[in-house]
Image: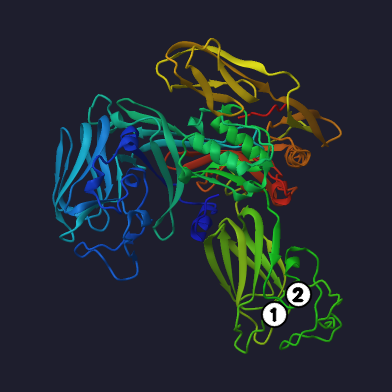
Amino acid sequence: MQAASSAYKELMRRKWRNPLSHLRITIGMINQPAQASAFISAPDDYTYYSDLEKPMDNYQVKELYAACDQDYTVVDGSMYFLPREQESVVLNQGIVTEDVIGTIEIHFPIEYDIKGLTIEFGKAYPVDFSIVSDNHTVTVEGNADGHYVTEEIFEAATFLKFIPTVMVNGQSRLRINQITMGIGVYFDSKKILSATKKESISPISEELPAIDFDVTVDNQDRTYDIENEESSVNFLEIGQSIEAVYGQALDDGSIEWIPGVTLLLKKWSADDEKMSFSASDRFDSMDGTYYLGDYHEEGISLYDCADEVFQDAGVDSRDYWLDPYLKEILIVNPIPAVAHKEALQLIANAGRCILYQDRTGKMYLKSSFLPDMAASSDNEAYFSCAATVLEKEEKDDYALTGSDYTVSDGSMYFLPREQEGAVFLNTGYISEAVADGFGLFSENPSVTITLEATYKCFGLTLVFGRNWPTEVVFHAYNGENSVEDYTVSALEQQMLISHEFPEFDCLVIEFTKGCPNNRVVLDRVVFGDSTDYHLEYGTELLKSPEGSQLEKVRELQVVRNIYGPSSEETMELVREMVIVSASGERYTFYFGNASYELAAALTEPIEGQTVEIVESSAYFATLEFSGVTGPVEVVIYGKEYAVSTAKVTRQLNDTGSQETWDNPLVSDAAHAAELAEWIGDYMMADREYNLSYRGEPRLDANDLAFLENKYIPNMLIRVTEHTLKYNGGLSGTIKARRDVSYVADAKNGLAGQRLFQHR
């Protein structure tokens, strides 16, 4: 669920809220082939600290080197000294001309029609300059910004030359930090007739996640007429980026914008009245086959497997994120020869993760369970036990020497001396440090809570002993990155922190001000709900929920696929006639079953003709021919792995169907048992709801929500399908499954086309 301000949440929960919502959509009309093939033909014309590739690859210039250009360098600590040698340059500076007021020339291997340019010149931008291509010249005067956009069309362009005449800071080199071959076409609420976003996800990976976005815009003025050669519609291409944001007016008149989607254009059409287009998520286009799966006797982490699949699919490493938790899960079986998206689904399932695309277009493989937590402190008294603050048991209380701490009502215990063999009662965290008369510490005490995977929560509760501190700072980390520092003052003995924390895998609770002349005594830390969204009658819900009882599952069987050596002799895997045009040419052959001990030979070689395997996996072999031209028959020999199966069974109900879950990556018995626990819990939650509601742009598929029910208070549901419709106002539908709170209670979670033999 997307984060939003308290004012937004309060407004959206009112019975009567402003029915008029806003929507903005941008299509980035980028000529992708031109963008991908652009290059600098004369690198010697640019400084040694230039990067001649990143400006065309969507990298930003974030930090600058000091240079001797006129009025360029500042001494505020924001710039770095320039290395003397090229190999020491680590900061991206973009393209920088060697000459002062020099020219930058970008080339393409073939002719391209480019509609518009978006250029980041940076702080030293040209005021007067020209853009020259094969058939068109644009002259610019009085440019007043480092961000420059033009809608000019450069037809049949094989080069773009940028020629400055006046720079904003005088005698300066020309720089291009970033350049995009195209611009964006923009639609707002006045132009948009309707829009529908539909998301679906399977919490146990029976199907791949999907996001579809359909939009219709007004075209009565024929702005998007395909017969108009300069119309923007003629520059739309499959795969271009579509971004949408939703807006809601607040009481103060401002509009709070909620990120909507970042998808890829799938199709479009236009007539005299309207233009329609559709977009889908990035997984939809990842349909190439993955053949690199191999057997790993010593094991390979699911993290490395997923990374290899994304790389093989040609996805930029900046466009996906893998949960570090996956590094801890090893498999030995090869990933089968399936589509890249299906390979990722198998990995997500085996790793107890959910596979999804976020609203910025980034793809994620993320753990889908409440992770194990551990508390510790490097500043605690000898009778303290910080690890127990996560446990539910009531804590014992020792008499301490802090001001006004000890009472004589029999509720406190005498403190044993610190000596070998001493046995202590069940305490929580008690700081070694004692606050001074002003409540300050010489070294602030803290408790660190580490998690095996990332987690997002909506509030937590701190339970203190007597004489609690007055101020605490929460430091949240995700990996090595600090994601938030949140301060809370005026604490109470039992303090509910109503705050939406970002996802974290480490939370440091630092006490910055204590009770004067007292230690910090923290008995418990209780993490709050994993959602703050409620679906209630009279507000969100438009009509009563439609509930259905799903078929009961009596028994769940999780299949183990165990690979072993074949008892058969080496066999012929491939025999094929190929035509080799030149010595050194390579051919790739694919196998239907996982194979090993591969060898290749020519059936009737003549002297000097050889063939060798230069690359292979369990499902392919690439051969290189030497001394061969013309037709030749080649044979690949090898063995196919012998695959046996075993099953781990879990009884769920006394009656019902028997279900089999078969993930080919699972071979280990313990791994299969964890999978059975997780999937079994999901199947036992056998009630499903269809809901009609007012529509909420914050909601995503797989979110948790509380559904009002007169029999079960705070009934938790997980959204599996969410449709959000816009036509000037909002409305929506939800399909959800009841009581999947086990995902928050179990160690093992899971999540994304139905690859598994689920029957």
Q: Position of residue 718 (x, y in %)?
A: 65, 43
Quarter of the image where one finds residue 330: top right
Q: Amino acid at mark 1?
A: Glu
Q: Is residue 98 left or right of residue 379?
A: left
Q: What residue appears at the point 19 percent right and 63 percent down from the top-left corner?
A: 70
- Assess whether mark 2 and mark 1 are in contact (beta carbons under 8 angstroms): yes
Spot occupied by residue 735 in the image (x, y as percentages of width and height): 62, 37
**First in sequence: mark 1 or mark 2?**
2
The residue at 71%/70% (across/down) is: 463
Q: Residue 563: x percent and y percent?
A: 72, 30
Which residue matches tag 2? Answer: 384
Mark 2 crowd level (few <14, some 14–19, many ≥20, 10 Å Cα): many
Residue 299: tell me if it is visible: yes
Which three-letter amino acid code belongs to the residue tagged 2? Ser
Q: Look at mark 1 in the image and give the residue it sits on.
A: 432
Quadrant in which the C terminus is drawn: top right
Q: Element type at marker 1?
A: loop
Q: Position of residue 481 (x, y in %)?
A: 52, 59
Residue placed at 53% from the left, 44% from the top? Answer: 694
The one of 691 and 369 positioned closer to us in this rendering: 369
On screen, residue 93 versus residue 597, left or right, reads left
The front one of 564 and 473 is 564
> Dot 2: what SS?
loop
Q: Which residue occupies 59% across, 39% down?
A: 305
